[in-house]
Image (cartoon, rainbow, N blue to C red):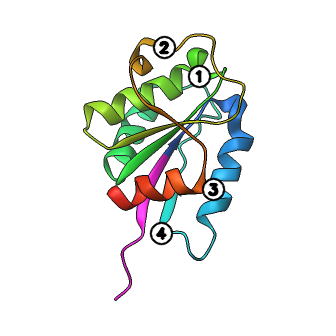
């Protein structure tokens, strides 16, 4: 019997959209055990976006947040991560590149941030 594909929400700063596209490309691989949900904000966000986004996060098995130097100023991304923690959705923080933030936002301080690798992504998905 084939295992159910996991739904994973991706959280990223809009400046890091290309990294998200790479991550989504990995999910298209036939051997990939997961799908992604993207709620990228192309318009200024409002309460309706937050409500819709929270609903989508709650409908996912986990959230992967791509952390870069852009993350500390990415209010939408930080809200998504906070929302996942509030909803008790498993979160994997992952550095998107070597261009890391000089300091981490409060919500990320003391949390493990993984190196981007297929092995780390696969291990996270398998725990969901």
Left or right: 83, with 87 as reference point:
right
Q: Earlier in the sequence, mark 4 or mark 1?
A: 4
Of the two numbered discs 3 and 2 in the rendering, the one whose residue sits closer to the viewer: 2
Please give the residue where the numbered disc 1 appears in the rendered image. 71
Left or right: 89, with 29 as reference point:
left
Tag 4 near tag 2, CB within 8 Å: no
Residue ID at (33%, 56%) = 127
**Is residue 54 a member of the stretch shown in magenta?**
no
Q: CA distance from mark 4 to mark 1?
A: 27 Å
Question: x%, y% of residue 99?
Answer: 72, 25
Q: Of the numbered discs in the image, which one, if any, rests on residue 105?
A: 2
Q: Of the numbered discs in the image, which one, if any, rests on residue 24?
A: 3
Tag 3 near tag 2, CB within 8 Å: no
Q: CA distance from mark 4 to mark 2?
A: 31 Å
**Which portion, as a residue range, is magenta?**
1-9
Q: Secondary structure at mark 3?
A: helix
Q: CA distance from mark 2 to mark 1?
A: 8 Å
Mark 2 is surrounded, within 10 Å at the Cα level, by few (under 14), some (14 to 19) or many (20 or more) other residues, namely few
Q: CA distance from mark 3 to mark 2?
A: 25 Å
Of the two numbered discs 4 and 3 in the rendering, the one whose residue sits closer to the viewer: 4
Please give the residue where the numbered disc 4 appears in the rendered image. 33
Q: Earlier in the sequence, mark 4 or mark 3?
A: 3
Q: CA distance from mark 3 to mark 1?
A: 19 Å
Q: CA distance from mark 4 to mark 3?
A: 12 Å
Q: Of the numbered discs in the image, which one, if any, rests on residue 126?
A: none
Q: Earlier in the sequence, mark 2 or mark 1?
A: 1
């Amino acid at each position: 019997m084939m295992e159910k594909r996991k739904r994973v929400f991706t959280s990223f700063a809009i400046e890091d959209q290309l990294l998200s596209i790479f991550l989504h490309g990995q999910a298209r691989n036939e051997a990939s055990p997961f799908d992604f949900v993207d709620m990228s904000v192309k318009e200024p966000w409002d309460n309706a976006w937050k409500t819709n986004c929270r609903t989508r996060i709650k409908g996912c098995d986990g959230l992967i947040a791509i952390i870069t130097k852009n993350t500390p100023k990415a209010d939408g991304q930080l809200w998504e991560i906070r929302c996942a923690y509030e909803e008790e959705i498993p979160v994997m923080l992952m550095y998107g590149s070597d261009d890391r933030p000089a300091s981490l936002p409060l919500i990320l301080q003391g949390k493990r941030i993984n190196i981007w690798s297929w092995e780390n992504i696969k291990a996270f998905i398998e725990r969901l």
